[in-house]
Image (cartoon, grey):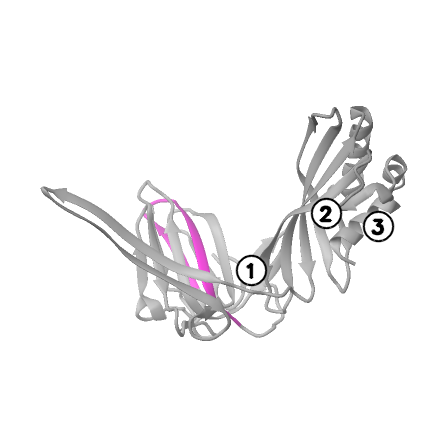
């Protein structure tokens, strides 16, 4: 049973909603009987959120329901029952897949030129796919430095590096990305990330990404008041190959970025080289981090985030 089928089934089971508008008047896609009243359900977007080392995946689908009715009061009553039946709900699909949360993110209304009313609601559906999805992963490593120097004689130019990574675990390939945005570290504080068991929280559930090689690492220091980031130098099992050696660190000043890449073979991440430390020095720091690499075979565990 796919998402559209599950929506129809739940609609039929919602007695009050089905009494107002029978499920036979609920259409999916662009083809439908134009006679009013009716509801049209359409998928606005479908994006993978994360892939797990056990082969499962999390998808985020934005689903739109459009209630079309000649009378506003009747359309509004249907919309109230839609919210009761679907907002903040979870339900099973097929083969172990589940909708973990279906939540309203937007609703609005308008009157068409023919006088009919159109009430619209958007739902964000977070879906757990037990067997994963047909995965293709592409990444691009890109850096650019441009200048325009005018001192009587003008020199303007640009030095660029832009290389793609295709899906796979070999040279010039990658399988996954892990990222965090706008993380805050107080001055003197630090976070250590285990690259072989990185966790991401989705709707209160923790999922693991287990890298075996790192093809690219981007760290941005978003602070502008002097706080600096020290990247590297974990106390135990440090991931240090791109920094030169155990204990070595790279300083990322305020309002600056660090991009490291090893597009071909990647830097290994394993039991003895797995911990990446990020520390704040000289002031509080807000930072973001993204890592692209290849994955370990299916493994158990939910991963971890920052260890302070």
Residue under pointer 3: 9
Residue 208 shown left or right of residue 227 in the figure = right
Q: Is residue 277 magenta?
A: yes
* Residue 184: percent from left, percent from top: 45, 47
Residue 263 shown left or right of residue 125 in the figure = left
Mark nearer the viewer, 2 or 3: 2
Q: Which residues are magenta?
A: 276-295
Total residue callouts? 3
Tag 1 and tag 2, C-beta contact below 8 Å = no
Q: Picture quarter containing residue 260?
A: bottom left
Q: Which mark is residue 29?
A: 2
Q: Which residue in the rendered view is the most extreme toward the left?
A: 152
SS class of the residue under badge 1? strand
| Pick the front one: 251 or 39 | 39
SS class of the residue under badge 2? loop
Q: Is residue 73 magenta?
A: no
Tag 2 and tag 3, C-beta contact below 8 Å = no
Q: Is residue 71 above or below residue 93?
A: above
Residue under pointer 1: 199
Q: Main secondary structure of the magenta part?
A: strand
What residue lies at 79% left-to-right and 52% top-to-bottom? Answer: 6
* Residue 269: percent from left, percent from top: 45, 72
């Amino acid at each position: 049973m796919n998402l559209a089928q599950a929506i129809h089934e739940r609609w039929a089971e919602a007695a009050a909603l089905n009494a107002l508008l029978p499920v036979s008047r609920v259409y999916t896609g662009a083809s439908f009987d134009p006679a009013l009243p009716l509801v049209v359900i359409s998928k606005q977007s479908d994006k993978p959120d994360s892939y797990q080392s056990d082969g499962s995946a999390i998808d985020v689908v934005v689903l739109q329901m459009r209630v079309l009715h000649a009378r506003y009061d009747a359309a509004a009553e249907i919309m109230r029952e839609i919210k009761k039946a679907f907002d903040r709900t979870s339900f099973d699909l097929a083969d172990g897949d589940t909708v973990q949360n279906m939540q309203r993110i937007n609703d609005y209304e308008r009157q068409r030129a023919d006088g009919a009313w159109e009430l619209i609601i958007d739902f964000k559906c977070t879906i757990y796919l037990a067997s994963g999805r047909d995965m293709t992963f592409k990444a691009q490593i890109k850096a650019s430095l441009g200048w325009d120097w005018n001192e009587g004689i003008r020199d303007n130019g640009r030095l660029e590096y832009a290389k793609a990574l295709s899906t796979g675990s070999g040279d010039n390939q990658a399988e996954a990305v892990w990222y965090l945005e706008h993380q805050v570290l107080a001055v003197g504080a630090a976070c250590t990330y285990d690259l072989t068991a990185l966790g991401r929280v989705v709707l209160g559930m923790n999922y693991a990404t287990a890298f075996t090689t790192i093809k690219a690492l981007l760290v941005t220091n978003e602070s502008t008041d002097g706080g600096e980031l020290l990247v590297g130098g974990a106390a135990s099992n440090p991931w240090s190959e791109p920094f030169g050696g155990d204990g070595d660190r790279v300083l990322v000043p305020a309002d600056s970025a660090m991009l490291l890449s090893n597009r071909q073979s990647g830097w290994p991440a394993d039991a003895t080289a797995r911990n990446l430390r990020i520390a704040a020095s000289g002031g509080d720091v807000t930072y973001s981090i993204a890592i692209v690499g290849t994955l370990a075979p299916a493994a158990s565990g939910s991963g971890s985030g920052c260890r302070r």
